[in-house]
Image (cartoon, rainbow, N blue to C red):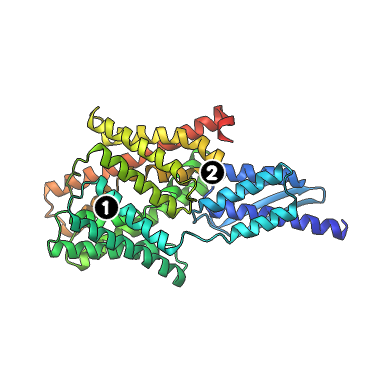
Amino acid sequence: MKDGDGKVADSAENLLLQGAELLFTDGQTTERMVDALARLGAALGFRITVLPRWGELTIHVDGAAGTRQLISATRPTGIHMGKVAATMTAIDASCAGQIDAPALASRLAVIAKYPPASLFRFTLASTAGALALAVIFGAAHLLSYGLIALSAGAGAVLRRWLAKLSENLYVQPFCAALLAGMIGAFAIQFQLSTAARLIAVCPCMILVPGPHLLNGMLDLARGRVALGAARMIYASVIILMICTGLLLGLALGGESLPVSGPSQPVALIHDVLAAGVAVSAYGTFFSMSWRTLPVPILMGMFAHATRWVMLSVAGASVEAGAFVACLIVGTLATPIAARLRFPFAALAFASVVSLIPGVALFRMAGGLVALMTRGADVPLSLLTGTITDGMTAVATLVAMAFGLIMPKLFITRFMPGFAR
């Protein structure tokens, strides 16, 4: 092979690696990533096979000069919708012949430097998201909202500071939850609010790694068992760190998270508006542009209104309400994500974040700790309350996951034109 041909081949392979790393690292679904890279490879004159694994992305490149193997040590731990959308747009433009390889390389290099949301916007979104969830779960006192805002805002600043100090994947959610638990314990001890449980829990609910759970479910559904299981384990460990930090923070203040206690009913208009605020907060976490933020907000508000009607009017269970709401969002998000070139999991989860059964999940964790410490002297109410919270949380999460991914799998399989 001539030296010039070798340089061209190396340049094309670097393009494939650049695009793969951006999509894989920043939250694109595996199927869409593989499809985009296959189209880019064909446009560059290669036939490629992508083998994504946790911690390693391998690309087999078949060309005129033979077969080569490209390996990138990368993990799918980030969510940056702006990077994914821009990368998909650039790849589509290259495949359509609108830009050449050097222009694509330049554009991908710029995209790789896209920053996350600014500290001010991130902190504001964290505060607004936690307050919105407090409204949805029935917080009623002004002091409660003030403490929740303080906890969530301080947690956001702490997370950004820790990100500069450590690359550990679990330090940020653990420390933010620990802070929330300590502030919640302070509120309980000094009887500052009747909603002390929400003061501790709401800042923790904005830490739940929903897109990783959804991407893991999609990978499992498509037979990528190893990658899907790795994503699920990663998300589960983060949730475990959140629970541990929350309960430890409460314990340091001599308090615990009480089992039982239903949420207060909320008027439809308050419920829907608060859901819109929560969705906008998650759009910010995922670095969505202001221009496209109304899309998930409207989907989330409509989904929450549907759930409210099912629960309050039709008398449906929490799980059924969440399933129907997520079924609607999954149906809408599949073509919209394809059109806007967004990662489906991030768009879908941002739209339904207000449905996450965070209160039940954290109460279950608190109940399990109480059961362990009480030993044989366990009251029946604690045991039944812990089981009820656990079953409610698990059933709701499963209903949400199936509601979101079933429409995507159906549309992708039987109506592919709507998913491209």
Q: Residue furthest bottom?
A: 165
Residue 317 lies left or right of residue 109; in this view the side is: left
Question: Label 2: which residue?
Answer: 224
Whole-percent x, y for residue 312 in the image: 23, 32
Residue 2 lies left or right of residue 136; in this view the side is: right
Q: Quadrant of the C terminus?
A: top right
Amino acid residing under circle 1: Phe
Whole-percent x, y for residue 374 in the image: 15, 58
Which one is closest to the eye, mark 2 or mark 1?
1
Whole-percent x, y for residue 381 in the image: 13, 46
Residue 192 lies left or right of residue 87; in this view the side is: left
In which image quadrant can residue 388 be found?
top left
**Residue 335 is at least partly visible in this image:** yes
**Residue 245 is at least partly visible in this image:** no
Question: Label 1: which residue?
Answer: 362
Q: Secondary structure at mark 1?
A: helix
Q: Residue at x 49, y 59 (%)?
A: 116
Q: Residue at x 60, y 57 (%)?
A: 111
Return the residue nearer the eye: 71 or 178: 178
State whether residue 354 is above or below residue 200.
above
State whether residue 174 is above or below residue 30.
below
Amino acid residing under circle 2: Arg
Contact? badges 2 and 1 (CB < 8 Å): no
Return the residue nearer the eye: 107 or 38: 107
